[in-house]
């Protein structure tokens, strides 16, 4: 169930946030450069990821200023402003101290927050991230100027169709439903102009001088084959943050909620709580018994080779409804595509 959206005051601006779960630990999720905390719950993979985090924490989500449901801004925010937004959200949520899970651009922001407010930061988890965006002689695995230019030149494709961004998440490369949702998510999160301005600002990120100052328990997670940010970025962080734990995971997807999301969640849960509880219920993909009657009906037709268009006509429902049911079924069954569904149908008990 989607949590209620509330607003925290950060100076004169309103910052949208949500709280879900009742675990003993507060966990602030610091997402990448844009987000939309309402639209996030529409995608089954991401919704499942958020729900799993909320099984062992009181999860606090928020949209940075200038993005999603938070107040728009005329210029990209500074790091200081973004840190103050985290502080304001924690205050509004009644959190005196929390662990921070920083994903992608949220990684260095979480590191800066932890150094600035160590008394309010219980632990840091940094996933798919980096210490410095751009490449230089002392940081050869950063992004080159050419990569930054190509990134900016191609952004319109992500906002129009979601297709361009899928190259960094190969598990959903052929998933038209996911790409359609991703494009909608981006459009809801920020305008193309604001997104490009945020990328230019993010390209200036460099927290290398702060790493030795991190005195908080820190977990660094990174998939070894991902192409958005090379795994060498994670190794650099782990070597320079005192006593940091590095876990390299198999896989090539940049976003942690696609691909083998459970391996990411397992590491986060064990690091923050010291143990892992087995997920329960249909929301966490326990097999064919988790499917609704309609999902099971659509899955059977998909296995027979029927397209979404043909299934929609046969069942007298909308094509988008069929795609939504299939996406939900994929999450519950732990598969990523119709091809994998058909191949594993027997093992899944369908």
Image (cartoon, helix red, strand yellow):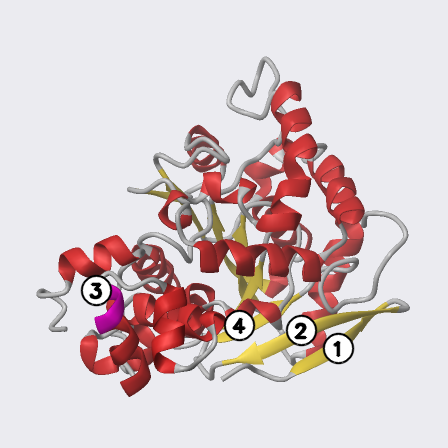
**4 or 3: tag closer to the N-terminus:** 4
Instruction: Name the residue tied to disc 1.
Output: 7
Residue 52 visible, this angle: no
**1 or 2: tag closer to the N-terminus:** 1
Q: CA distance from mark 4 to mark 3?
A: 27 Å
Q: CA distance from mark 2 to mark 3?
A: 40 Å
Residue 91 occupies quadrant: bottom right
Instruction: Name the residue tied to disc 4.
Output: 41
**2 or 4: tag closer to the N-terminus:** 2
Report helix, strand or loop for mark 2. Answer: strand
**3 or 1: tag closer to the N-terminus:** 1
Q: Which residues are magenta?
A: 300-304
Q: Position of residue 168 (x, y in %)?
A: 47, 40
Q: Nearer the viewer, mark 4 or mark 1?
A: 4
Residue depicted at 71% across the width and 81% down the height = 6
Q: CA distance from mark 2 to mark 4?
A: 13 Å
Instruction: Name the residue tied to disc 2.
Output: 17
Whether residues under marks 1 and 2 lie with C-beta atoms below 8 angstroms apart, the answer is yes
């Amino acid at each position: 169930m989607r949590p209620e959206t509330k607003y925290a005051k950060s100076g004169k601006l309103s910052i949208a946030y949500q709280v879900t779960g009742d675990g003993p630990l507060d966990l602030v999720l610091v997402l990448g450069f844009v987000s939309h905390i309402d639209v996030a719950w529409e995608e089954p993979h991401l919704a499942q990821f958020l729900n799993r985090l909320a099984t062992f924490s009181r999860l606090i989500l928020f949209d940075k200023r200038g993005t999603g449901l938070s107040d728009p801004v005329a210029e990209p925010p500074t790091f200081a402003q973004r840190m103050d937004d985290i502080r304001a959200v924690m205050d509004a949520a009644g959190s005196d101290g929390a662990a921070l899970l920083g994903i992608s651009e949220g990684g260095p922001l979480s590191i800066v927050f932890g150094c600035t407010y160590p008394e309010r930061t219980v632990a840091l988890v940094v996933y798919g991230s980096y210490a410095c965006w751009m490449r230089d002689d002392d940081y050869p695995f950063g992004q080159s100027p050419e990569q930054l230019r190509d990134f900016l030149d191609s952004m319109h494709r992500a906002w129009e169709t979601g297709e361009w961004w899928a190259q960094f998440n190969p598990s959903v490369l052929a998933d038209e439903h996911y790409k359609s949702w991703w494009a909608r998510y981006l459009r809801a999160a920020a305008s193309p102009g604001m997104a490009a301005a945020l990328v230019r600002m993010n390209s200036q990120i460099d927290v290398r001088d702060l790493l030795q100052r991190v005195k908080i328990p820190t977990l660094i997670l990174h998939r070894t084959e991902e192409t958005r940010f090379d795994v060498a970025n994670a190794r650099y962080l782990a070597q320079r943050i005192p006593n940091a734990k590095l876990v390299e995971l198999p896989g090539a997807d940049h976003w942690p909620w696609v691909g083998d999301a459970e391996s990411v969640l397992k590491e986060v849960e064990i690091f923050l709580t010291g143990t892992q509880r087995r997920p329960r219920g249909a929301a966490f993909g326990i097999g064919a018994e988790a499917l609704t009657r309609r999902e099971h009906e659509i899955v059977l037709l998909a296995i027979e080779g029927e397209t979404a268009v043909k299934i929609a006509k046969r069942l007298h429902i909308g094509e988008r409804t069929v795609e939504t049911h299939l996406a939900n079924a994929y999450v519950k069954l732990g598969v990523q595509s119709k091809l994998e569904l058909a191949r594993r149908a027997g093992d899944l008990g369908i």
